[in-house]
Amino acid sequence: MCCGQRGKLGAVTECFSCPIVATVAPYQRAGHLDLPAVSDYLDLIGAAGVETVLVNGTTGEFASLTVRERIQVAEHCRSRWGGVLIVHVGACAVGDAVELARHASGFADALAVMNPFFFAETAEAGIGAYFRAVLPHCKRPTLLYNFPRHTQAPIPPRLAAQLAREFPQLTGIKDSGKDRALTYEYQQIGADFRVYLGDDRIGARVAEIGAAGVVTGAGGPVVELPVAVATAVAAGDTGRAEARQHEFDRYTDARKRLPISDIAFAKAAVSARLPGFPSHVRSPLTGASHEQIREVHTLMGSLLPLLRR
């Protein structure tokens, strides 16, 4: 699809097949991880043509998981996913991030690292010290993970460039911010430094923007649409890319209108395709109500014919 070849375990993957799908973390009613449901979700998105997944990211509620649970999820996904596996290892505590990086480096195709998300407006020197403590333990191709809405501290492009020079395994950044001026600065770091955008509305324009591709989390339940967009972009079919993007935007618009988190929405949407898939979330998030789940299922019913085209 839009950004290159499928990676192999042990090989340096410089460019991942897109869209990259950030997976959800399903829970049983009692609150425990539901690993069989994880398998079902991986089967669903794999059948749609997805080749690269990111686990333990924002959509995967990593901040609500213990280190042990994050290890469980990563190991389970590796056992069930034959494509490219990117494992997010960022944490507020440097020691936790190092432990997760060492673990994931043993089997993941690539890693991703977000800067700490509690200490808002952290100084550049502090962010740099964090990454310089964690990155030596990342033994696979690694992406920085910029999500200033949650960290309140965007990764400065100057720092990203310095880190890319210091750590050869640092191959790019997942940019989930909305500041395209910042995106442009990331793109200037170098031809081998790939920028992946966490923006569901941007897929048809990745070539115009110059990004390597997109990462979708909440779009996973209708992943056939971003896959179709990426395929059309790769083929140079601008008209089809824009048409499929318009269909995907319809889903995104509905998601934004409903007053629940993207994670709760995504789980409710998955349950429309996988009957019995749990829609529970962990506090402090709140799950979709029965009425909201019915509304999401109605939306999904209207979209399903589009997914089969």
Image: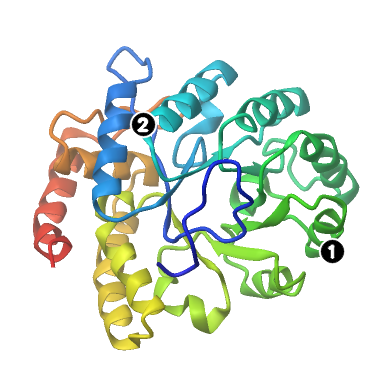
Residue pictured at 33% horizontal, 64% vertical: 226
Q: Position of residue 135 (x, y in %)?
A: 78, 40
Asked if marks 2 and 1 touch (Cβ < 8 Å), the reply is no
Q: Position of residue 211 (x, y in %)?
A: 57, 72
- Could you tell me how far apart the alpha carbons at marks 2 and 1 are, in whole angstroms? 38 Å
Count residues near mark 2 (Cα–Cα under 10 Å), then give few for <14, some for 14-19, many for 20+: few
Taking the view exactly as shown, the residue that stands out farthest to the right is 125
Residue pictured at 73% horizontal, 43% vertical: 120
Judged left or right of residue 6, residue 182 is right
What residue type is disc 1 on? Arg
What secondary structure is marked by label 1? Answer: helix
What secondary structure is marked by label 2? Answer: helix
Rendered view: 150 above or below 284: below
Q: Nearer the viewer, residue 143 or 253?
A: 143
Marks counted in the figure total 2
Q: Position of residue 228 (x, y in %)?
A: 29, 68
Give the position of the C terminus as an image quadrant.
bottom left
Q: Which residue is mark 2?
A: 80
Judged left or right of residue 83, residue 27 is left
What residue type is disc 2 on? Arg
Q: Which is closer to the viewer, label 2 or label 1?
A: 2
Residue pictured at 40% horizontal, 41% vertical: 23
Q: Which residue is mark 1?
A: 158
Rendered view: 142 above or below 75: below
Residue pictured at 12% horizontal, 62% vertical: 308
Q: Earlier in the sequence, mark 2 or mark 1?
A: 2
Rendered view: 51 above or below 278: below
